[in-house]
Image (cartoon, grey):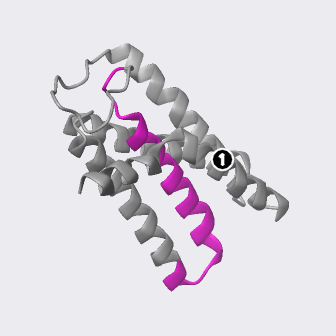
Amino acid sequence: MNLFFKTATWAGSGLVLFPLALIIAGILWLRGRAADALLVSGGLLGAFILVHGFKRLFARPRPNVQDLLVSMPSDFSFPSAHTTQAAAFALACAMALSRHVSTTAGLLIWGCLGLTVLLVGISRVYLQVHYVSDVVAGAVLGAAWVLTLHRLLKWADPQF
């Protein structure tokens, strides 16, 4: 389980998600889907900015644990940046990608991305670098930001 969760936690890392978001947004942009491209890229970037602002605002220390499986991140604990980023990226991608596919493919997209977010959140607690409340707050923050951005994009372009 240790290796599994050490691997799963990377699905919420900015080092993985930012290049992936740029590739997906670029493809969407080239296909004439500028609003979807903005949802994916802006969803992740906005979540990144918000989560790090909230970390400084709340300044909650990380769990005090001995014998960690990974090195303890140097920033604050609340909310979980990995979970926030994973939730924002997954929701933005699911909204953008499932819009133009069959119902079955859409459900598969939503299911896979939702499972990924769940595994990222569980991995952060399993690896003992976050409290459960950090992970829950991160998921809510990421989803709330993407839903807000979606509403703003829809307001700017009612056909979106």
Quadrant (top left, top right, bottom left, bottom right) of the C terminus: bottom right
Give the magenta part as a residue range: 76-105
Q: Is residue 81 above or below residue 57?
A: below
Give the x, y percent position of residue 50: 49, 28
Q: Is residue 140 above or below residue 3?
A: above
Residue at coordinates 49% horizontally, 55% vertically from top-left? 91
Q: Is residue 39 visible?
A: no
Residue at coordinates 23% horizontally, 57% vertically from top-left? 1
**Is residue 74 rendered to the left or right of residue 39?**
left
Q: How many tags in the picture?
A: 1
Magenta highlight: main SS: helix
Amino acid type at circle 1 is Pro
Residue at coordinates 62% horizontally, 43% vertically from top-left? 18
Q: Is residue 37 visible?
A: yes
Give the x, y percent position of residue 158: 70, 55
Between residues 95 and 72, which one lies in front from this camera angle?
72
Between residues 15 and 67, which one lies in front from this camera angle?
67
Between residues 18 and 39, which one lies in front from this camera angle?
18
Residue 21 lies in the magenta stretch: no
Give the x, y percent position of residue 120: 36, 50
Q: Secondary structure at mark 1?
A: helix
Query: In the rendered image, which residue does mark 1 sit on?
Result: 19
**Is residue 36 rendered to the left or right of residue 61?**
right
The answer to which image quadrant residue 43 occupies is top right
Residue at coordinates 54% horizontally, 27% vertically from top-left? 49
Q: Is residue 77 above or below residue 26?
A: above
Residue 89 lies in the magenta stretch: yes
Q: Is residue 52 above or below residue 16?
A: above
Give the x, y percent position of residue 85: 48, 42
The answer to which image quadrant residue 92 occupies is bottom right
The answer to which image quadrant residue 69 occupies is top left
Check disc 1: other Cα within 10 Å, few if <14, some if 14-19, many if 20+: few
